[in-house]
Image (tube, coloured by chain):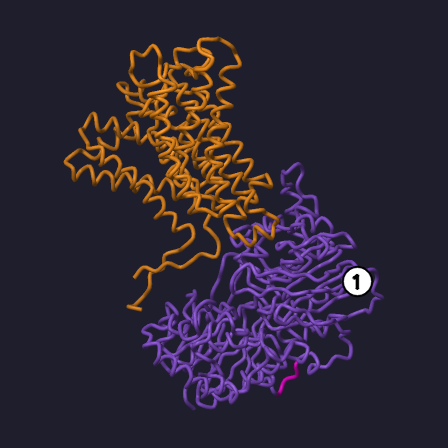
Amino acid sequence: MDEPLLVVEGLTKAYPGVVANDGVSFSVARGEIHALLGENGAGKSTLVKMIYGLVRPDAGRMRLSGQDYAPSEPREARARGVAMVFQHFSLFDALSVAENVALGMEAPPPMTRLAERIRAVSEAYGLPLDPDRTVATLSAGERQRVEIIRCLLQDPRLLIMDEPTSVLTPQEVEILFETLRKLAAEGTAILYISHKLEEIRALCDAATILRRGKVVATCTPRETSAAALAELMVGAAFQAPERQPVEPGQVLLEVTKLDLPPDNPLGTSLREISLAVRAGEILGIGGVAGNGQEELVAALSGEATTAPGTVRIMGEPVGHLGPNPRRQRGLLTAPEERLGHAAAPDMTLVENTALTALARMNLARRGFIDWPRTRALAERIVRRFDVRTAGVEHAARSLSGGNLQKFVIGREILQEPRILVVNQPTWGVDAAAAAAIRQALMDLAAEGAAIVVVSQDLDELMEISDRFAALNGGRLSQSLPTRGLTVEQVGLMLGGTHGMHRPQEASHAAP
Amino acid sequence: MLHLEPRTEPSRRWSVIAPPLAVALTMLAGGALFAALGKNPIEAIRIIFWDPLFSDQFAAYARPQILVKAGPLVLIALGLSLGFRAGVWNIGAEGQYIMGAIAGAAVGLAFYPAEHWAIFPLMILAGGLAGWAWAMIPALLKVRFNTNEILVSLMLVYVAEQLLASMALGALRNPEGGGFPGSRNLQQYPAASNPELIPGTGAHWGVVLALVAVVATHVLLSRHKTGFHIRVAGQSERAARFAGVVPARLVVFCLGVSGALAGLAGLFEVTGPAGQISIDFNVGYGFTAIIVAFLGRLHPIGILLAGLLMALTYIGGELAQLMLGLPAAAISAFQGMLLFFLLAVDVMTNFRIRIRKGRG
């Protein structure tokens, strides 16, 4: 038998306080779709960063196509045929697709030739994309295609995909899978990171499962049940969240005809948004990214202010109030962007606790912050939500994405909100942590809080919310009880106009 | 090949080692520079760093001068550091310093020759208020019309300089000065003077206030909500808004405090070491304080040490010019090296150096 395309042997990488990867070994064959499964902090990101040359291993070695492989920077990895699509896109909103692709190339060809090549590749792999469109006008799925095509133009032998489906609609996922299968059939190996077990079972030929930095199992996902995969990943029996139906109480949060112009030229304006959430109820708001989610969350949190009567907390008009007065009245928010919005990157977890908790928890006396009490709260958040960190005095940016997410959500939940607004609560979080976060949200509702969950993950919304509404072009649909809604109905609510174009339609659309 | 790799967290060890290491490197490179100019490098370094403090011949004069120079530098730099931490760039402290001196001196001279205990406190108030008001111009323009505070505050320095000249030649000119430009000497007007408090130390009320301000800004930044908001705003504007910070209020606060402190520094200078309003009253403390603020890495204790070090190189530099005939430009280059090396060594706080094998 040939030597596999990529062989990883004994890779080890330690950070202060944590061993991210401990003697990791596995291999990927040509044309194989290989899944990398693991909880948050299991070391998946560190592992692929080492393969892509972003991080240097402390020990261990890699071989690519039978030759030693030790990339010191991504450029070298790309030169050897390794490409990566990141979970967070690095695209410039104001530039066109082709310009964005050119920015990532060592020696970009003239723009017209590049546009032709983009069109050719996008048609060959069933990823419709118009090279002249401005990125700001693209949906999340289309943005991802830009990143994928950027990679495909380099003719990669190994394509790494980090949680590619978390922002896609069900139809977009299908198209992506077809593309990946096509690539694999042509001999490209794909390293696929995900925590969506069903997806991995449908797509992948092999799976390597990581737990706490070590490989705990290798298996063929098609022959392994989702429950068994989850158990391997978590190391314990997997618990699906449970929901105790609660009789909804009085209306806690009410939004009436809220209009909000965007604060930047590429933003979405909100138009006549009305909603009401009762005590004990979870309202799920779905929609493809860029349809006003961030703006709506800002209008609810108080970062964007509107006319007093447009937002009411238990009847009291608060539309003109900023975030802290709203927090004092019990309305707490967890925004989507963890670093730089929900948390200050270089501040410690204690300081990041103070970021939102000063007002509601009375942690400041005459303006002087009570750091010992803030620290105690930070420690409670870390303990209660199993945030993996070497200590609360470490900077927020030293945490892995999922752990920071647990911290951000935990920080708001432990302040005992009456109303909680969360945007993308489980974005980039592994299955076990996502389940814990969802369970915590449902427990909070059971205790009588009103909760608004904004998410692009439809399965998540179907699982936890009582009512569902869709955000489309800055307008919010009427909310319907979740029970009994089918995925197709939801797809219709999401609006259709932002859905997928089939390949043949898109080739017409191209000028 | 050397290769910089970002650290996940700033290294605490490096942030402690960096300043002394930068001073040591400056001595080495500065020594090489002096040697290239044909001077004995060891002697030059000794004259700059050692003689002002310990030489029998010069210390008696030089030692008090260190506090006289460090006082205003530290006071102004502390105010600036608040704004710099929050991303509010007051470059016009020199102008606020001048305005504080003019207003304070004007209040004092208005009472001349009356003797009353309240005159000096009133002058202090006037000096602080004038500096604050001068800084409010860029602050309000920024808040209201989104103008750039760097440009506005900087340009106001030149306006203040013109005003200073016109005051020295006109309204505040000493009527008994025989037509020479410059105001009455406030050192000779007890109710309005800011004397050396302990003979031979150079400490006057401005130095005392600088020390108080070190403690106050340290407490503000580490314990108070406003200081916390300043630090958050400097890291991420979005996170700051989320924390309930109103950016406009922060701009007004930071520019206001730095303007008031610069104004006070000017007042203490004109009533003390300088003694009078004159055309060339300002000597660039407001600009040097920007370097002091960064040399002290925007930390109150660091600024205190940086202010003292900067004052030392000024005094020592003058001494070296006198004793060895070193050109003034060589001393400026030497001071520049200090900042250069500190910023360079500081990179190690956030990055580690890796030696890459092979040609990459």
Horizontal and vertical percent position of residue A275: 73, 65
A90 or A404: nearer the viewer: A90
Most extreme residue toward the left, as rendered?
A: B38
At mark 1, the secondary structure is strand
Residue in the image at 35% along x and 30% along y: B161
Q: Which chain is orange?
A: B
Q: Is residue B279 above or below residue A492?
A: above
Is A150 covered by the magenta stretch? Answer: no
Give amino acid for label 1: Arg
Residue B331 in which image quadrant? top left
Q: Give the chain ID for the purple colour.
A: A
What's drawn in magenta, residue-wise?
Answer: A223-227
**Residue A497: where, in percent of width, then height?**
60, 79
Q: Quadrant of the N terminus of chain B?
A: bottom left
Q: Chain of mark 1?
A: A
Q: Which residue is mark 1?
A: A278
Does A43 sit left or right of B195 as displayed? right
Predominant SS of the magenta segment: helix
